[in-house]
């Protein structure tokens, strides 16, 4: 009788762990951070471009962001010309500054952009307690620096 109880308990614990592990693996990054769009406005050399961000921080988390500013080459392909990353704590009650600029977005790096066509790729690595780390990302529109 006691053996049957222990076997039932062991089965329940193992099944619960497998269910939690499956759930933790498939839980999307958007449960913590949802990025819908990043739009960059054309600018001139020497001025940091203005950005329009549509995002929601659903839950507090510790994360790392990576910002790659890419310039279009003559053959139409893009090359990273400026890159920044930092680890920070994201709070669900945080608000973006007005206006959001590329200098703010790529902190601690300030990208000195020459005339050309660019885009910004941003990736977040979301450190989630009790879950595998999650990844979210967005690619901006193409914009001009004149």
Image: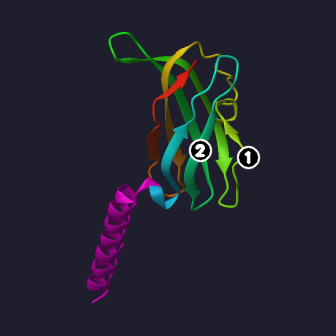
Q: How is the image coloured?
A: rainbow
Circles 1 and 2: CB atoms closer than 8 Å:
no
Queried whether the magenta region covers residue 9, the answer comes back as: yes
Q: Relative to 74, does residue 134 appear above or below in the rendering?
A: below
Q: Which secondary structure lies at badge 1? A: loop
Label 2: state its secondary structure: strand
Residue at left offset 34%, top offset 79%: 9
Q: Which residues are magenta?
A: 1-29
Mark seen at residue 98: 1
Instruction: Give the residue drawn at x 37%, y 9%.
Output: 74
Which residue is pictured at 59% across the width and 57% down the height? 57
- Callout 1: few (<14), some (14-19), or many (20+) C-alpha neighbours within 10 Å? few
Q: Is residue 91 left or right of residue 52?
A: right
Mark 1 and mark 2 lie on one chain; the one further toward the N terminus is: 2
Q: Which residue is mark 2?
A: 52
Outermost residue toward the right in this view? 98
Please give left or right for residue 75 compared with residue 62 in the image: left
Camera-nearest residue between 48 and 22: 48
């Amino acid at each position: 009788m006691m053996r049957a109880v222990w076997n039932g308990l062991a089965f329940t614990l193992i099944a619960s762990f497998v269910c939690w592990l499956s759930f933790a693996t498939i839980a999307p990054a958007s449960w913590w951070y949802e990025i819908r769009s990043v739009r960059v406005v054309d600018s001139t050399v020497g001025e940091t471009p203005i950005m329009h961000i549509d995002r929601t921080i659903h839950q507090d988390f510790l994360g790392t962001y990576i910002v790659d500013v890419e310039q279009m080459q003559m053959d139409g392909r893009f090359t990273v010309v400026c890159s920044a990353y930092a680890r920070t704590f994201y709070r669900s009650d945080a608000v973006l500054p007005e206006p959001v600029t590329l200098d703010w977005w790529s902190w601690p790096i300030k990208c000195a952009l020459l005339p050309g066509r660019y885009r910004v790729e941003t990736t977040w690595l979301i450190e989630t307690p009790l879950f595998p780390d999650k990844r979210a990302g967005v690619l901006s529109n193409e914009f001009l620096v004149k």
